[in-house]
Amino acid sequence: MRNRTLFLLIPALLVALLPVLSGCSSGGNRAKASADSTLVISMLGDANYLNPVIGASVTSGNVYGLIYPGLIQSDFDTTTGLLNFIAVEKSLLPLTNSGLKDQKRSAIARSWSMADDNLSITYTLRDDITWNDGTPLTAHDFRFSYELYGNPVIASPRQQYLAELVGADKGAIDFDRAIIVPDDTTLVFHFYKPVSERLALFHTSLTPVPKHIWEAVPPAEFRQSGLNQTPLGAGPYTLTSWQKQQQILLESNPLCRLPKPGNIKRIMFRIVPDYTVRLTQLQTGVVDVVENIKPEDFSGLESASADIDIKSVGLRVYDYVGWSNIDQEAYHRDGSLLPHPLFGSADVRRALTLAIDRQSIIDGYLGPYGVICSSDISPSIRWAYNNDVRPYGYDPNEAVRLLEQEGWVPGPDGIRQKDGRKFSFALYTNAGNSRRNFASVIIQQNLREIGIECRLEVQESNVFFENLRLRKLDAWMAGWSIGLEIDPLDGWGSDLEKSRFNFTGYRNSRIDELCMLAKEELDPVDARPYWMEYQEILHRDQPTTFLYWIKETQGFNRRVEGEEVNILSTFYNIDDWTLNPSATVSQ
């Protein structure tokens, strides 16, 4: 069992699979046998990189999580809202998950020890793990990988994970002192200040890549390297083929010892941007798993020719409308941090939130599977959630008052304007997400009613997310699957070069300070007061309009057995799933 936190074609294999996976009738018993050994998962968008250093899309994470190994495992305690960390011979908290108690573990770390002064953590690694080419996997791979994560030229979205290492306080990590490798099975991280054991485990468990493969690639060429198309891992699956915008095919890795090869022989991630097509394929048995099923479609699935189970879990994912807080043109031109001409004012952003009827979106699409959102700390993280921060209600009159207070008054055509500039913009989102398409239409109507022109633009998923990464969009609708260990500086930190997920350019020194103060607490629960204030500030400043938390609903063909859907992931224990021969498989 594993727990996970974004090439070369083989035509003969693909031809053998196509009759079954496309619903054709040719192939007879061989096709049926192939289908019975292939799990097909329908995904909205393709991976961007199959490399944990730079991968950032949902599909990327789902795929590379099966290919690459992990230092430690994690589990989530729903009672307390705390994340547990687990090595082969040790866990931070008592184990509550019976599967993790009873089964072999996938961690590379045998154990760890935290220094008495909390200035270092030392891992003892297994000595029997190799990369798939037979090269031993050692502590040197982890040290090398952290140098990649921290390299500003590579611009990993996870640079903030290195924020406590020696040298980070002076602007550049001193890797010679920060990460020490006395031998192949000992890995030591040194921090410039005392760090809680929990935070140390969280920040030192980034996924490694093989040093012997990547060390010859210059950082400037890292993102363009062909090695991103042919990942060398050590996990339960290996990449067989990647047909861009079509499908990714994985095969069970017979060499895996973390803890074993995947049970299902092949896993196919099929890229299907259209929701209706994904749903039809699930109903007819062409695919086995579809995420984010609309509640209104439950009854139709129950009467489908394929036997289907609907499972739900939450609350970890939320949708939001992002407003660029800074003038993107000025920032890209010379690094200037000027207020955005439309969205630079917190009062304007608050007005936009007040103008959006979020409950109407929930009622029309999510029903009981949606909860209005007020910040990026989930109600599931019970110990840190601020119940006193109440989401803004739908109040277009107050929105108008705030806009006019800011100088935005109706123009001759009814569109608000200020200093000769119309309040007019394009709202971007990614193709194939029916929930966001539904919400964007309501948002457009709501804003039109208060004199704001909002044009809707849809982009292919990888194009959309790359534009977000490069901070090219002024307004967009997207979503986050939050980390279950609270560490939001990568999304809100004022250093925009290090906080690569801060697409809005929001900067607030008190948010930076609160995040740092919270990290200094050795017991996470002692940081609760800081997170209470953090949520109050985000609620006041509205750097984005937080829309709703989503209780995710996933559809499974009943030939899939052993799946444990929980808040960590739909694919939490996917390498333990099995497939039973079933008449529901398309032939």
Image (cartoon, rainbow, N blue to C red):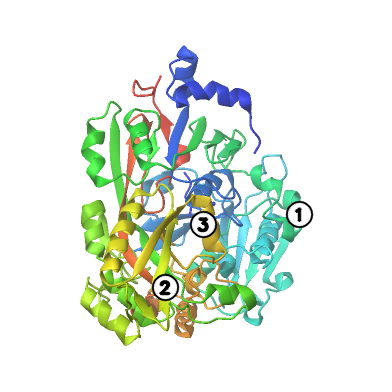
Q: Quadrant of residue 111?
A: bottom right
For label 3, the residue is 465
- Residue position marked by numbered label 2 in the rendering: 524
Q: Do the residues labelled 1 and 3 touch (CB within 8 Å)?
A: no
Q: Quadrant of the C terminus?
A: top left
Nearest to the observer: residue 199 or residue 404: 404
| Crowdedness near tag 3: few (<14), some (14–19) or many (≥20) residues, C-alpha within 10 Å | some
Residue 450 drawn at (x, y percent)? 27, 72
- Looking at the rendered structure, the kind of residue marked 1 is Val
* Residue found 66% across the figure and 42% down from its top: 230
First along the sequence among labels 1 and 2: 1
Left or right: where 281 falls relative to 295: right
Instruction: State the SS at label 2.
Output: helix
Mark 2 → mark 3, Cα distance in angstroms = 32 Å
Residue for badge 1: 217
Task: Point out the tag, 2 or 3, that comes first from the N-terminus.
Answer: 3
